[in-house]
Amino acid sequence: MLLAVETSGLSGSIALLSEGQVRYEHTLQAEGPRHAQVLVQETDLLLRKAGLTVNDLSAIAVSVGPGSFTGLRVGVVFAKTLAWLQGIPLVAVNSLQAAAWQVPHSHGVVTVISDAQREEVFVQECRWDALADNWERTGDVRIEKVGALRHFETVIGPVVERHRLKLTEQNACQLLLPVIPMASGVGKVGMRLIRSADFSCPETLEPLYVRLSYAEEKRMAANG
């Protein structure tokens, strides 16, 4: 049984998957920094609901970003600790790639955006690969000004509604779909990473922040 953890945004979730299927999924009853207060308890409740214990877990997939600095730290530390204690494999999933699983495969190619603060967004293109049965990332995550986004056919993500007017006015895309990364998507990507033995080390895995926090940038500037 695979446990999937998604805490990259304000709304977190956890899921259990086996044999390629999502068996259970649950939205965490806390937001942002408060994920840490509920993650252990609600994972235990989800396992009980499934008639399982932590000893039934065979692997863990965790969303590593980009996303909320605090949320990512909470999810990654939880997943690393559990994987280490249980001695089971750990896989790291790109949060934006996981979000692509919230839309039908028929879209073919999607551009996923999420909040990077300062009127900027994290951007990740994903393409459906029928052979791999997966939304594959094309290129690396980058940061762009919302006003600089141009000529994408389908844009999805948790901040689509916030920027809908600007994206529509500048003809940046033909279709806008508001979706958020979910643990089920993290698990689906995670299962494919497990099949390819693309494991992460619990002792060294770190979140994919992409950029320094504002506080870190300010401190570096102050230090010259």
Image (cartoon, helix red, strand yellow):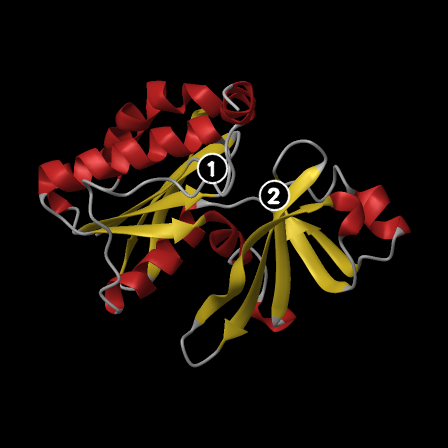
User: Which residue appears at 32% of the width and 40% of the height?
Assistant: 206
Which three-letter amino acid code belongs to the residue tagged 2?
A: Ser
User: Which one is in front, 24 or 116?
Assistant: 116
* Residue assigned mark 1: 8
Q: Determine if residue 148 is in view.
A: yes
In this rendering, the answer to whether 57 lies above or below 100 is above
In this rendering, the answer to whether 42 lies above or below 148 is above
Q: What element carries label 1?
A: loop
Give yes or no for contact between labels 1 and 2 (Cβ–Cβ under 8 Å): yes
User: Which one is in front, 25 or 102?
Assistant: 102
Q: How far apart are marks 1 and 2 (CA)?
A: 10 Å
Label 1 vs 2, first from the N-terminus:
1
Query: In the image as oriented, which residue stretches furthest toward the bottom?
Result: 131
User: Which residue appears at 52% of the width and 21% of the height?
Assistant: 215
Residue 197: image quadrant is bottom left
Which three-letter amino acid code belongs to the residue tagged 1?
A: Ser
User: Which residue appears at 64% of the width and 59% of the height?
Assistant: 111
Tell me: 213 left or right of 55. Answer: right
* Residue assigned mark 2: 114
User: Which residue appears at 45% of the width and 43% of the height?
Assistant: 65
Tell me: 54 left or right of 215. Answer: left
